[in-house]
Amino acid sequence: MLVTLVVPSAIICVYSVLTRGAYGGVERPFTFENFARMFDPLYGLIILRSFWIAGVATALCLVLGFPLALFIARAGARKNLFLALVILPFWTSFLIRIYAWMFLLRDTGLINTVLLGLHVVREPLPMLYNDGAVILGLVYGFLPFTVLPLYATLERLDKNLLEAAADLGSKPWDTLWRVTIPLSAPGIRAGAILVFVPCLGTYLTSDLLGGSKTILIGNLVQNQFTASRDWPFGAAASLALMAVAMGLLFAARRRGEELL
Amino acid sequence: MKRRTFLAGIAGTAACAHRPRLNVYNWSDYVAPDTISNFEREFGVAVRYGTYEGSAEMLAKVMSGNSGWDVIFPAAEFVPPMIELGLFAPLRHEKLGNLGALEAEFQRPRWDPGLQFTVPYMHGTTGIVFQKKLALTSWAGLWDARLSGKMTMLDDPLEVFAACLKKIGDSVNTGDPGQLRAAGQQAMTQKKLLRAYLNAEVRDQLVAGDVAVAQAWAVTAGQAIAAAPDKLAYAFPAEGFARYADNIAILRESSRADLAHDFINYLLRPEVAAKIVQATQTATANAEAWKLLPPAVRENPVLYPPAELLRRGEWFEPQTTASQKLRDRLWTEVKSSA
Amino acid sequence: MRKGLALYAVAAYAFLHLPLLILAVFSFNVSKFTQWQGFSLAWYRAAFTDRELLESAGNSLIIAAGATAIATIIGTLAAYALWKRASPWLAGAMYLSLVTPEIVTGVSLLALFQWSFRFLHLRLGMHTVILAHVAFCVAYVAVVVMARLRTFDPVLEEAALDLGATEFGAFRSVTLAYLAPAIAAAAMLAFTVSIDDYVITSLVAGVDSQTLPMVIYGLARRGVNPMLNAVSTVVVVGLGILVMISERLRSA
């Protein structure tokens, strides 16, 4: 397993310091130009955009996932059923789930057909091929990634603490804010990492729901390795992405804590 | 009914494993439904038929020199660089008896005068498909803010820059950095108004009405208009436009050159080419095939425009390395801009 | 608050499941557009007679089966090794593999393969896809098996050794038997992950290794196609059944 991780990374490292040939392919001279290019304000924009979209998607996943996780944790006997209902859509083909949203959001898709039919709008709403659609697709795809760790943490929460808070006169809403949420910090951290990093490198969602107009880091890397045939630059971008992923992973670890 | 076909399909695929094989990589929707199966039946071979949506996609796969494909369909502007890269196998004309059926113009094309490596297949122009009520006539119409969100351009740097260059009055083949940068600026301004960059995939969206205006190849336009004749129309932009031609070539890495030659010769047969034209709404480089077409197709203004109109079109020329580098850089910038 | 939560949960589940249900409903629609015009199985018929679709589905199954078999073995051994000797490198590599964006994994593997082809005279094909799938499935298997291992008492293995079993024998009759349901669940997980993969597969696939996700992607790019609705429904139902079996096994 180390082999399949280390060797490809090594090759990517080497490629990233080479230059692109006239029509593609890798050649000498060795150069750091590819990394320097990453600091070009143009790509800086892509990186910022990717962080922004990943950030919003992660925040939404956390906010939307927390009440659901709370519900399941308190659901008593049918916990496993509810949990399974969350996991089920997740494991059934990411690609198909993105397509489902394409089907719904298109100008001639279901949502617009209904809205037009009810005369709520006069022209179809442009819901596809923009940042909003991408974020929606990401949230839909990664919501279970926050529900599961949050549920795990909430389930292990010591009920006595909650009772103690109630005994001390705290109202349910206050208990939630001041006791439950802070105590679920490990779950929140795990969920955030599990959503943010893949969202940062997302490719399919921005490609299909963004109309290949929304270029995020994932699309940039993919583009360099296929249509643009600029492997060295793609390699540099890919390394940058890996570095961010690893950085976040280390930053979020606490001693003795298991992520999964 | 469906179960039998399903089982037959499985059996067929299994049987395929024992017949000689040919791997063909072509543009999507570029053959008639029975072209490949007829070839398989007549020559007793199994064809693996893959499709792609863009030249860049094809080139990326093929450049490694061991992609596994035998026959590909490069566009004219890619032929000189691919010859230089040594990607093609030389053609043996003695195996291509039907070469004489080609139009005079395509017997000695500028990108491969002796037809040493390629055989012209289908050609056309790049223009604008639009909803009839919009009455567009020029590239400038695709920068109209009122159509924001309902326009697409091709996902192809050559074509997008060609439209931009024509809009500002320059040649599509210019290598002048100033002109190229100006074209790049145009593209970036336009991007904000675009719905997406789509190649042939835009056809269904045009028919459905999701897209109102699209830069499209004549073949895609022909197919879209055939599906929605009262809604859509095609325009040859007033500022000028690009002409394209797709050619058949055999990859040097192929070990099945003989069979590949047979396939090319088969495609050159007038009846076969005529059938393809009628199924895919494209213009053929095959003069004998053109004679076999019904008048409705022969006089289709989208596919076979009058000669004076065609004169406004420009063929793409190979670019210098410097120009190519700048164009690639500009394209990445356009794609990456907000 | 209880009621509020319950209401919210209903809305959340609707959000999660409705899109797929709608997709399925419209796969039975006679017309291509989103107005209901009648019930029909025509799209399913079209899907099952499409040669390319069938072939790619076959490829996907073969790849998934092969990759699952290999990844399960490697993953189980890796989890066992990790459990016996907590190596931070191995654990780190495992988590990294899970969290690394697919595009990075795909691109690195592509570079690796193309580089090795200079010496090995091979080309991209089913074997490269299977290898790539093994590479990213191993981590999933390892995580599931690890979770189960944590509830395993090492004393049991020691007892077996004391009773005269060889090391391998102890592993086989005691540990492996205990892990069996987890290994089965992990295998199913690896299978579903492998069947669904698009990004990595599209980069390392060769001429003969077109997979179902690749065909689906091509169809999805071209816009809405009811045949795709039909294919999607079949895939979702199939994978759904697999996932349910897997969950049953995991909690066994």
Image (cartoon, coloured by chain):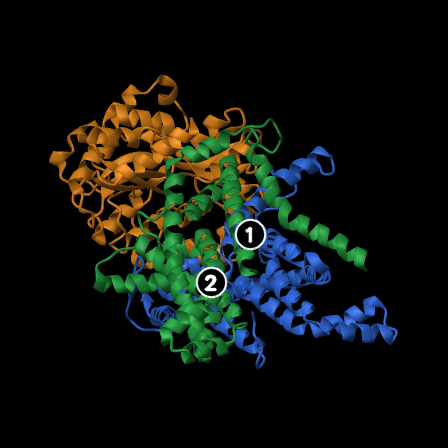
> Where does the image place residue C28, in percent across and percent down from the top left?
56, 32
In the rendered image, which quarter contains the N terminus of chain B?
Answer: top left
Question: Is B194 rendered above or below residue B325?
Answer: above
Q: For the residue marked with disc 1, what is the amino acid?
A: Met
Label 2 residue SS: helix
Quadrant in the rendering for residue A118? top right
Q: Chain of mark 1?
A: C
Q: Looking at numbered disc 2 in the image, what kind of residue is underneath it?
A: Ala
Categorize mark 1 by other alpha carbons within 10 Å: few (<14), some (14-19), many (20+). some
- Label 2 in the same subunit as label 1: yes
Q: Which mark is residue C244?
A: 1
Question: Toward the viewer: A78 or A124?
Answer: A78
For mark 2, what is the residue? C180
Mark count: 2
Q: Quadrant of residue B264?
A: top left
Q: CA distance from mark 2 to mark 1?
A: 17 Å
Q: Residue furthest top?
A: B295
Residue A39 showing in the rendered view: no
Q: Residue furthest right?
A: A169
Secondary structure of the residue carrying numbered label 1: helix
Q: Nearer the viewer, residue A77 or B90?
A: A77
> How far across and down, in percent of the image, does residue A11 sit?
34, 69
**Image spot of residue B111 (x, y percent):** 24, 43
Q: State the blue chain.
A: A
Viewer-nearest residue: B11 or A99: B11
Visible residue check, residue C26: yes
Residue at image location 64% in from the left, 70% down from the top: A187
User: What hue represents chain B?
Assistant: orange
Chain letter tied to green: C
> Which quarter of the rendering shows the C terminus of chain B?
bottom right
Viewer-closest of C250 and B256: C250
Labels 2, 1: front one: 2
